Image (cartoon, grey):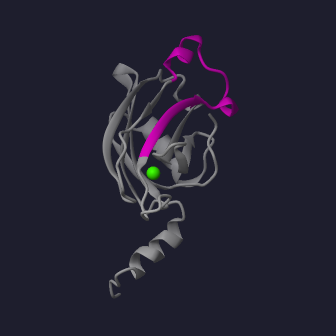
Amino acid sequence: MERLKNGVKQTEEKEWGRGRLLLSLSFVAEKNILLVGVIRAEGLPALDHNGTSDPFVKVKLLHDANMGSLSSNSFSAIRKFKTSVKWKTLNPEFREEFSLKVSMVDLPKLALAVAVFDRDLGNNYLGGILLSASSKGERLKHWTDMMKVHSTKHMRWHTLSPSLLPQ
Ligand SMILES: [Ca+2]
């Protein structure tokens, strides 16, 4: 297939809509640490007048209430992080890793909310994903792979959804 100047990019944007995000997950059982790697995103929507965006990613660990209550010492462990801003790009390269203290008992009852924003006066929402044991498809597969095989970086692309994540 011929690589047309704009043809290829436009097709990709149609398929992905809000774009997609490459994430890495690794649970280190000996240290009770979940490592979340925000690697890169592709085909993000352009929200600025110059035809690009200024993306950054927020990562937040939440309690998935569908999966039962947490052990008492876990509430303090629920934290959030954000990456640096990548200016004027729809295909940002982040390569940032965050470390979250989580006990193995609580891991199946947690959810990871990953949301991409365009840095602006009001930080516009570009898209996001929610990974947990009550997710579906690729997201569920990624979460369960991380829980089953420890100390291994599980990498997976996720299609970003336009729906807002729980705060
Ligand atoms: Ca912007």
Q: Quarter holding the C terminus?
A: top right
Q: Quarter holding the N terminus?
A: bottom left
Q: Answer yes or no: is residue 152 visible.
A: no
Q: As rendered, which of 57 and 137 lies closer to the eye?
A: 57
| In the displayed structure image, the side of residue 126 where residue 5 appears, left or right | left
At horizontal 51% and vertical 33% (from top left) the residue drawn is 60
In percent of width and height, residue 24 lies at 37, 44
Q: As rendered, which of 31 and 114 lies closer to the eye?
A: 114
Q: Is residue 73 rendered magenta in the image? A: yes
User: As drawn, which residue projects farthest toward the top?
Assistant: 73
| In the displayed structure image, the side of residue 116 where residue 91 appears, left or right | left
In percent of width and height, residue 70 lies at 61, 20
Q: Say above or below: 116 vs 42.
A: above
In percent of width and height, residue 137 lies at 57, 54
At horizontal 55% and vertical 48% (from top left) the residue drawn is 125
In percent of width and height, residue 132 lies at 57, 39
| In the displayed structure image, the side of residue 27 where residue 70 appears, left or right | right
The count of marks equals 0
Q: Answer yes or no: is residue 2 visible.
A: yes
Quadrant of residue 52 within the rendered picture: bottom left
Q: Say above or below: 18 vs 144.
A: below
The magenta-colored residue range is: 56-78
Q: Is residue 59 rendered magenta in the image? A: yes
At horizontal 53% and vertical 60% (from top left) the residue drawn is 18
